[in-house]
Image (cartoon, helix red, strand yellow):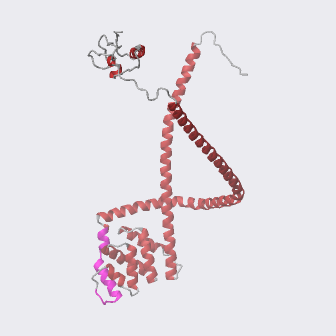
Amino acid sequence: MSLALVVEILGDASKLSSSLEGAKSEVGGLGSMLGGSAVKIAAVAGVAGIAAGAIISMTEAAAADRDEQNKLTAAIAAATGSTADYTAEVDAAIAAGQDRAFTDSETRDALQSLVTATGDVTTATGLLTQTQDIARLAGVDLASAADAVAKAHVGQDGPLRKLIPGLEKGATATETLAAATKLAAGQADTYATSSAGMGARASDAFGEVAETIGEVFLPILDALLPIVLQLLRLLAQLVKAVLPFLVPILKLVGAALTVVGNVLSVVVGWIIKLVKWLGDAIGMLGKFLDSINPLKGISLPSLPFLSASSSTAAAGRAGTGRAASRAAPAGVGGATVNVYTTGDSIDAELAVTRALRRVTRLNGGVVPAVGWTGG
């Protein structure tokens, strides 16, 4: 049983109508205001997302720079056997390399090879300047040039000869290194003042700014990462604890779905068979009706008065003396229908003629006018 609540307003309802219209306008205005605010919020969120992405990128750059510093420090300690702090000397070499269009990463890689070969930071930083010139002359990266110079320093000048063809054969490694240094002198400074060098220095300067900003957020990352890793480990433990209980349930669900799938497969098979059976039955019924059709094989011949010709059509039968009394108009759709009867009776011909007249009247055709004369 349902109840209907009918509220009837008696008296002047204009104030109520105006109040409702005002509320509608205010709601519409609020919607417009919220729509604009939504756009602004979305824009702010987009900017915040970009800023967050930039901060993450800069923090990652700072972290990579710190890893490179730690790697070089470990290499120096291993090569020199000393725990002395070479930070100031290394930083000076990096700054000089940046003035010559080499990044801090390139300089650290080169210093690692040179320190490992010489066992001394001062000697390595001295060879670094020569290595930078050779790299620019040979057109190779600083790390490749540093490897060749380091090997030449310990008596293997083959790699250096490959970098700079034309060096004197048979000379000592020290002589080869001296000759290569003389040929390449000033190449790094020349490149640094070229358009390509200036572009490389500008790009490196922007990278340094990003690393500096990232260093501010690096302590935050250092503080958060252990917590995140701990949470991930706890999540993994939780999954391992819950998974043994979930596996049987998931297997039961899978088995149930398999049963449902099998049932649906059977039902669909039945439907397909039913549709095929109905199609065969309809086909057989059509064949049966066609076989018992009493009109099958009967065709109506052309009647002269239904032809498209406007000439006078003569109709008659031999021995009767009957003929059409006037010209027959156009037939049904321009078709010609001939009617033949047996016997002397004209009743069949008249019946067909009347039927054709009714058809042409119903379809807007020309009504044939037929008159019969004779006995």
* Position above or below: 149 against 4: below
Q: Quadrant of the N terminus?
A: top right
With 336 as the anchor, is 262 left or right in this view? right
Q: Is residue 349 above or below residue 160?
A: above
Kindly give the residue lying farthest to the right in the view shown.
Answer: 1
Q: Quadrant of the C terminus?
A: top left
**Residue 360 place in picture, x, y as percent:** 38, 16
Which of 363 and 45 lies nearest the eye of the viewer? 363
Q: Main secondary structure of the magenta part?
A: helix
Q: Is residue 9 above or below residue 300?
A: above
Q: State whether residue 121 appears in this view.
A: no
Residue 321 left/right relative to 240: left
Q: Which residues are magenta?
A: 168-191
Q: Name the image quarter holding residue 248.
A: bottom right
From the viewer's side, name the closer residue of 241 and 18. 241
Horizontal side of residue 5 vs 286, given as left or right: right
For residue 348, which quarter of the picture?
top left
In this rendered view, identify the residue nearer to me: 361 or 28. 361
* Residue 243 part of the magenta segment: no
The residue shown at (53%, 33%) is 288
Give the residue at x 57% y 39%. Answer: 275
Residue 320 in the image, given as x and y percentages of width and height? 34, 14
> Residue at horizontal 52%, vertical 27%?
28
**Does residue 27 appear anywhere in the picture?**
yes
